[in-house]
Amino acid sequence: MKEYKSEFLRNVALVSHGGAGKTSLAEAVLFNTGANSRQGRVDDGSSLMDYEDEEKKRKMTISASLAPVEWNDCKVNVIDTPGFSDFIGDVCGAMRAVDGVVITVCAASGVEVMTEKVWQMAEELNLPKIVFINKMDRENADFNKCMDQLKAKFGGVFAPVVLPIGSESSFKGLVDLIDKKAYFPANAQGTQITAGPLPAEMADDVELARVMLVEAAAEGDDELMLKYLEGEEFTDAEIHRGLLAAVRAAKATLVLCGSASKNIGVRTLLDAIVKYIPSSADRIISGFKPGNDDAMIERTVKDPFSALVFKTTADPHIGRLSYLRIFSGTLKPDMQVYNVSKEKMEKIGAVNTLIGKKIEPLTVAHAGDIVVIPKLNDVCTGNTLCDKAAAVQFSAIKYPKPMFMRAIEPRKKGDEDKIGAALTRIRDEDPTFKTQKNIETNQTIAYGLGEQHLAMLTNKMLAKFGADVVLHDPRVAFRETIRQKIQVEGKHKKQSGGRGQYGHVWLRLEPLPLGAGVEFDKEIFGGSVPVNYIPAVEKGARKKLAEGIIAGYPMVDIKVVLYDGSYHDVDSSELAFILATSNALKKGVPLARPVLLEPVHDIEIYVPERFAGDVMGDLSSKRGRPMGMEAVGNGITCVKAQAPLAEMFRYSIDLRSMTQGRGWFDMNFAHYEEVPHAIADQIIAEYQKHLHHDEE
């Protein structure tokens, strides 16, 4: 691919709800621009964009993929993104790399949940938006209904620049609202277009739609707004000028339509991207001084090199691939750049672009381009690379917090090292995947955005790195304590010829306040237990309490006092007193009203107001305690509550179901509290059953 200067570069992300046809649209773009000799299809596995095995198997986009194409003397970097919320992490990264978004809406399904999410993300980043109403040939396709939904959901100004001619099986072309001409495919592939007169039956619809177009144009230009208010007509050039300003300032949203599968409207969309999406030369990017995020720095294309790593992939054959959006300067092979985030220099090897998984080398990349660099092994997603002499840092990419948790372990014993290496590679590739070692339960906990997310990642671990794992519900880190003070005797006496073993203690067990931990004290008088054996008593007590007594969980909030005992001059030893102490605790704890404690978390649940009641009712069924509600804006209510961790492992799935995918939540550990007796009895009985089985 030839060299392109900044003003001839465009970057767009295709974003939408799953099933709206983003990948089909990307394939049509590749075909129309000559980047692919045939139009790839998702259904038959011939898609260039969905090339991962998991994507082909599931027939859905899981990972953002890049498609650089050439159109009207410009290079357009198209990023096809996932449409399922479990894989929204790649959408977050892609949106930081582009200068505008094409929001694909299914003409039959209309505005769906992920459409709302990506719209909000584009608004927060102030990105220009183009809506492409796709699948106009599908049954129940309705352009006007989609327009009404867009206005109702998002408000603002919408500028339709085309209208469909027909719909469903009769969809056959487009009317351009600016030049008032009809355009039809001139061949079966849709790569040639013929113009014709405006269909007479559409004259009224065209005039009504042009009113919206003119209103949108007026939003972008004060002079045009004055002309509009005075009732004057706009020329075609003025409409274009106003639309350009309004769309680039995110004051109006361009609306087009077509059918990606039939290749109708795709060439018009490419024209609109080149015309209305700004280049880097039209933008000023804000960063900050490294180490001081209050000291803002602005970057233009003419400034020294700077770039943001917005995606990382780990391939077992190629190695690590870092996707960079260049914001200023130029990048060439063999350059030295400064990794601000890691405070170290990096050597750039080859500079490439990708079409799906096909690598193409570049000799130079200018500001505004998106490139792929191999083998930057210390570079992570979100890192800023720049010229050290003009250091700048870009803000971190905002990702949703992974809240769906599963315990992960090797399917075969002995594969722990292989699993550890695979987890590291997957974490590097996916910032929405986290792992944590739970010391108390000795489990590795995997956190993701949902069930499909973790299932896909475990499949990828096996396919790419040969790491076979299983997922299951984590163990809860319960704890044990007592509610009653008691005194108990413990003795260990053994005589088997020669020197025997003798240890004898009297202990007092006392409950302590919540969070006090374990305390040990002594009240020995008259040397009934020699001073040199007292540390052994403490050691035995702490060891046994850490192992747990009634259900195998650590015992906390308990005080053990050694107040009496006896010894033998010859047979006593440290081991004997350790065992005597253990015996005392095993006998005494069950008599001291033992209880189980469980971790309880503070939870904040964000949902549209209409779902708040359902959420409150569901929390009650999960032993949760609602603590109140408050409105946080944009029709969102925050429900605050406390609930046991044992009930929250799959809550992200439940919340998604209750709120049609519109809710999210966060939770943090609050404290431990007593497990209800009925549940505690089941846990204890299960432990005792396994204990007796192991002893047998």
Image: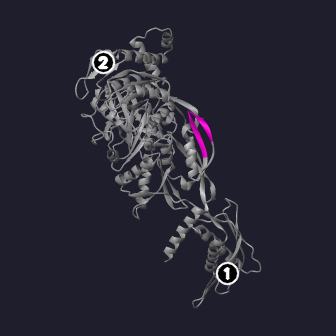
Distance from the alpha carbon under mark 2 to that under mark 1 = 100 Å
Visual colour scheme: one colour
| Vertical arrangement, residue 137 with respect to residue 581, above or below | above
Q: Nearer the viewer, mark 2 or mark 1?
A: 2
For label 1, count other residues whose C-alpha is less than 10 Å away and answer few (under 14), some (14-19) or many (20+): many
| Vertical arrangement, residue 484 with respect to residue 428, above or below | below
Q: How many discs appear?
A: 2
| Residue closest to the eye, 438 or 550 | 550
The numbered disc on residue 182 is: 2
- Element type where label 1 sits in the image: strand
- Amino acid marked by disc 1: His
| Residue closest to the eye, 149 or 238 | 149
| Vertical arrangement, residue 333 with respect to residue 277, above or below | below
Q: Which residues are magenta?
A: 629-640
Decide if residue 203 is in sight here. yes
- Amino acid marked by disc 2: Ala
Q: Please identify the residue farthest to the bottom as the structure is shown.
A: 497
Q: Residue at x 52, y 74 (%)?
A: 692
- Element type where label 2 sits in the image: strand
Q: Quadrant of residue 272?
A: top left
Q: Quadrant of the N terminus?
A: top left
Q: Which residue is mark 1?
A: 504
Decide if residue 342 is in sight here. no
For label 2, count other residues whose C-alpha is less than 10 Å away and answer few (under 14), some (14-19) or many (20+): many
Question: Is the magenta region chiefly helix, strand or loop?
Answer: strand
